[in-house]
Image: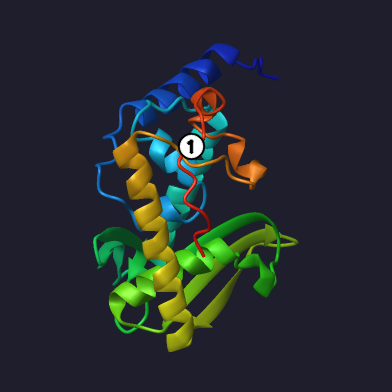
């Protein structure tokens, strides 16, 4: 029987290297992205003033997501354009997989087979914004799950023109709200979605800056 010994030292080396790779990546440019306006707006403004501090678990989660998307492209969506760049007025966005006549967003869960409620409102806001940018009313979601056995579900999401017009108005209001904070050097209030704070690269500074310039509701 061979000798088997766990190596915490190598594990730490791997973790440190993974985090270092995130720290050394190119910083996001000053242009606002559609994804900047989907969840925590405070994170968006903090990210323009402070350097992130990543945790290994967050870095690993990003790596899994990226690896999943790459494998998906090679297997099922090989003729699509990964990270297709689009514009909604002056907002830039990157579709997971752009194609004609359908664009695709991809989600992965370690849990059980999802239901329609798995497609969260904020995912639909992002995909809907991409649909507006593409002059479309439809998007497709590929959802891979692990339990009870690995599988995939495909969802087709169709918006009405009225829904997309309302979404566009919401996104542009958020753009103006964030742009005003950036110009004033201030930050929006903390998000009520406190689960986002776990693993956030800016939680180290978030509690120490004031929330000012409340411009009212965004919807």
Query: In which quadrant of the rendered view does residue 133 lie?
Result: bottom left
Residue at left 65%, top 42%? 194
The percent position of residue 162, horizontal first and vertical second, equals 46, 86
Q: Residues within 10 Å of mark 1 (few under 14, many from 20)?
A: few
Q: Is residue 24 left or right of residue 66?
A: left
Q: Is residue 148 left or right of residue 83?
A: right
Up-down: is 38 above or below 161? above
Pick out the residue farthest to the top: 9
Quadrant including the N terminus: top right
The percent position of residue 57, horizontal first and vertical second, equals 57, 32
Q: Nearer the viewer, residue 15 or 42?
A: 42
- Pointer 1: what residue? 212
- Specify the color scheme: rainbow
Dot 1 falls on a residue whose secondary structure is loop
Residue at left 46%, top 19%? 16
The percent position of residue 6, horizontal first and vertical second, equals 64, 17
Q: Is residue 6 left or right of residue 96?
A: right
Query: In which quadrant of the rendered view does residue 114 lie?
Result: bottom right
Up-down: is 104 above or below 36? below
Q: Nearer the viewer, residue 52 or 7?
A: 52
Residue at left 50%, top 24%? 205
């Amino acid at each position: 029987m061979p000798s088997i010994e766990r190596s915490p030292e190598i594990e730490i080396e791997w973790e440190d290297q993974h985090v270092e790779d995130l720290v050394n990546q190119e910083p996001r440019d000053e242009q606002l992205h559609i994804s900047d306006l989907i969840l925590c707006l405070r994170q968006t403004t903090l990210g323009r003033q402070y350097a992130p501090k990543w945790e290994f678990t967050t870095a690993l989660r990003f790596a899994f997501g990226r690896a999943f998307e790459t494998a998906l492209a090679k297997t099922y969506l090989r003729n699509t354009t990964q990270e297709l760049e689009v514009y909604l007025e002056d907002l830039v966005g990157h579709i997971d997989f752009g194609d004609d006549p359908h664009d695709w967003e991809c989600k992965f869960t370690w849990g059980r087979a999802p239901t329609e409620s798995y497609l969260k409102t904020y995912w639909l806001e992002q995909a809907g914004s991409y649909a507006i940018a593409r002059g479309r009313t439809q998007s497709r979601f590929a959802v891979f799950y692990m339990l009870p056995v690995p599988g995939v579900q495909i969802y087709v999401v169709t918006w009405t023109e009225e829904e997309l017009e309302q979404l566009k108005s919401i996104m542009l209001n958020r753009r103006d709200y964030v742009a005003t904070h950036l110009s004033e050097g201030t930050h929006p209030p903390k998000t009520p979605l406190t689960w986002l704070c776990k693993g956030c690269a800016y939680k180290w500074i978030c509690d120490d800056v004031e929330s000012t310039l409340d411009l009212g509701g965004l919807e």
